[in-house]
Image (tube, rainbow, N blue to C red):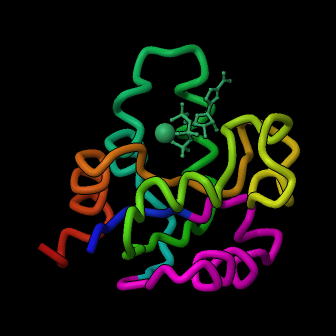
Amino acid sequence: MEKTLVLIKPDAVERKLMGEIISAYEKKGLHICALKLMTPSEEIAEEHYAEHKGKAFFSNLIEFLKRGEVCAMIVEGENAVEAVRKINGATDPLNAEAGSIRGTYAMSKSENCVHGSDSKESAKREIKIWFPECQ
Ligand code: RTP
Ligand code: MG
């Protein structure tokens, strides 16, 4: 079974959307293997978004992720990476499908409720960052 890393970002935790969001993955048939709430350090936030280092939005992205509690999850299922990305919807909520999490709950590209790994390789890398104890 494929695994992917999901983050419920601080905007969604603040808005008490955790239950609704977890439920969307579960209702699809995906399994939540591990789950933790934490306020990420700068180091974790920067490592997680390392691919975006140097881009204009990078510092805002890191400050946003560090703003409060994040719910990190390992989500498992057939084609979990692709399935989660579909449930999450497009990065910019204005382009996200109406039934997706971003299409339903988000209005801003920078505060877009959720993260899902973009490949199996990214999932492995990101699971190590957020769940080092699971190796
Ligand atoms: P994520 O990594 O959070 O799941 O989002 P994603 O794959 O859909 O998009 P990605 O390109 O990896 O971007 C990571 C996060 O950076 C913010 N972003 N802002 N201002 C901008 O042009 C811009 N581009 C990306 C978004 O919050 C996105 O989720
Ligand atoms: Mg991404």
Residue 126, image x, y percentages: 30, 54
Above or below 34: residue 15:
above
Quarter of the image where the N terminus is located: bottom left
In what quadrant does ligand 1 lie?
top right
Residue visible at 57% across and 50% down in the picture: 65
Above or below 80: residue 75:
below
Residue 118, image x, y percentages: 42, 44
Between residue 85 and residue 115, name the one nearer to us. Answer: 85
- Magenta residue span: 8-34
| Quarter-of-image position of residue 130 | bottom left
| Quarter-of-image position of residue 105 | bottom right
Residue 54, image x, y percentages: 43, 15
Looking at the rendered structure, the number of numbered marks drawn on it comes to 0
* In magenta stretch: residue 9: yes
Quarter of the image where the C terminus is located: bottom left
Q: In the visual, does 80 lie left or right of 7?
A: left
* In magenta stretch: residue 5: no
Above or below 30: residue 124:
above
Q: In the visual, does 79 lie left or right of 68?
A: left
Residue visible at 59% across and 41% down in the picture: 63
Q: In the visual, does 9 lie left or right of 121?
A: right
Residue visible at 54% across and 72% down in the picture: 71
Residue sitting farthest toward the left: 135
Residue visible at 36% across and 85% down in the picture: 33
